[in-house]
Amino acid sequence: MEKYNPSKEELASIMKKSPDDMTDIEKEIWKVEVLRSVAETTVKCREILSNVEKTKVKLRDTEKVGAEFEKKWQHFQDKFDKTLGTSATKLDCSVKKSIEGVLKKPKKMSPEDASGLLKEKNNIVILTGASLSAASGIPTFRGNDGLWTKKYKYCETPEELATLKFFKAHPEVEWQCTHDFYELCKNAEPNAGHKAIVQFQEHCKLNGKQCHLVTQNIDDLHARLIRESEILKPTVTSEGEPGFGFTDSVYEIHGNLSYSRCSQECSKALKPVQVPDKELSLEDQIPKCEECKSIMRPHMLCFDECYTQELHQVQTIKNIINSKVDALVIVGTANATTMANKLVNECLSRKILTINVNLEPCCDFGPVIEIKGKPEEILPKLFGSFKPESLKSKVKCKKFVKNVNPNGLKEKQKTYSTALRVIASVIKAEQIGKREKCSI
Ligand SMILES: [Zn+2]
């Protein structure tokens, strides 16, 4: 058969025909064309398959590279982190070292030895915090036990509860918590730590030394002992008089929850908190201002408030620190609050003797004497050597002089001779004390 090469148009026309309408030549052309087309498609399919295979291989390689890259990246990250961490630590260390170069390193010391250092000082500040009252059963604010973890309505965290914003939104809940805390404090007793501090304050007052107690606690335990002290007893105590609720022997920089004041500040006078009638609704338990009938607020510095001179005596404390303070004793505080932090930093920067009585160190550099332990165990040892016998005699002497009756000579003579005997016993006690000191 003669080979026939149709044109493209002829081929297209043949391919559209029905086999019945085709000539023999056209049928032959159709067969050849179909076979060619099948062969062409097969080739194309093979090509596609081959490409898919190639892609699969490439994908596998990529996966391998990906895993490899991931591994290398991780290694790089680890190395980077490590290097960064080491650099940060090195930088931190070098900064601390340079500070330590100027100052001194923290030093561990027994309370008895630290006590010896205090004897040479004349203007001492004692800064106390929540851990001091832990032994009296007052839970620390951020502690896991006790009152603060008790769930109060509308309140997620203890921090939220101690804000003015929360008080304004839910004063009845704020007062429910305040009343709970007030009752807890009222039933608590000052512990050996509080007692050792007040004894040291008395010693300082009788010996012409200055001892300023600054507390972050709002539990009234320091103030209670001071009110009971014959030597430190504040002169102004009557309700309604200026200064009521404050004593010059303790600066309560965060307030005192035994007192309340007008939330509208018609006056800044403090009023004692009372145990509420629990039969009343929470709203009715909120105390009201006698002057303007607004609700009262607890006398406590909230997290969203600033310190003031009038309520927190903050300028007085700054003046004390900036004057002639020669020793700072930190007790049971992490110095997390602004004022405490400033106070400690100021003393450290001026290289003032700083003694930290705490379970945790207060700062990891600076001229700090660290006495690790519970305040109620350490403070009696730190302050116990301040001659309690001599102190007692002096109190006795002071009482006699105070009770002198100006009428009646016999009475006078009797009182004077007794006073002289007491003074003689004081001198004797002091001489014994001096001898003991010399023998050491
Ligand atoms: Zn008022």
Image (spheres, rainbow, N blue to C red):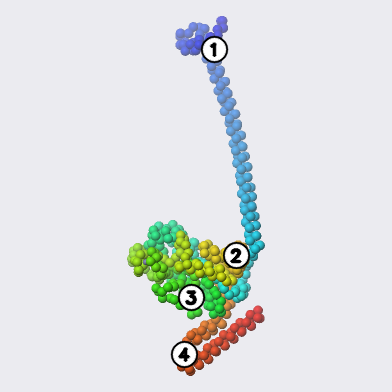
Looking at the picture, which amino acid does disc 4 mark? Pro
- What whole-number distance in Å separates the C-alpha atoms at marks 4 and 1? 148 Å
Check the image and report above or below for 215 versus 421.
Answer: above
* Mark closer to the observer (2, 1): 2
Tell me which residue sits at (64%, 52%) in the image.
87
User: Disc 3 marks which residue?
Assistant: 226
Q: In terms of sequence position, does the residue under pointer 2 or pointer 1 come before the other?
A: 1
- What whole-number distance in Å separates the C-alpha atoms at marks 3 and 4? 30 Å
- Residue 326 in sight here: yes
- What whole-number distance in Å separates the C-alpha atoms at marks 4 and 2? 53 Å
Looking at the picture, which amino acid does disc 3 mark? Ile
Pinpoint residue 268: horizontal percent, then vertical percent.
41, 68
Local packing at callout 4 (Cα closer than 10 Å; few below 14, some 14-19, many 20+) is few
Q: Is mark 2 within 8 Å of ligand 1?
A: no
Tell me which residue sits at (59%, 36%) in the image.
63
Q: In terms of sequence position, does the residue under pointer 3 or pointer 1 come before the other?
A: 1
Local packing at callout 2 (Cα closer than 10 Å; few below 14, some 14-19, many 20+) is few
Mark 2–mark 1 CB contact (< 8 Å): no
Q: In terms of sequence position, does the residue under pointer 3 or pointer 4 come before the other?
A: 3
Relative to 230, is 92 on the left or the right?
A: right
Q: In terms of sequence position, does the residue under pointer 2 or pointer 3 come before the other?
A: 3
* Mark closer to the observer (3, 4): 4
Q: Quadrant of ligand 1?
A: bottom left
* Mark closer to the observer (3, 1): 3
Looking at the picture, which amino acid does disc 1 mark? Val
Relative to 167, is 438 on the left or the right?
A: right
User: Disc 2 marks which residue?
Assistant: 349
**Circle number at residue 32:** 1
Q: In terms of sequence position, does the residue under pointer 4 or pointer 1 come before the other?
A: 1
Which quadrant does the N terminus fall into? Answer: top right
Q: Is mark 3 within 8 Å of ligand 1?
A: no
User: Disc 4 marks which residue?
Assistant: 406
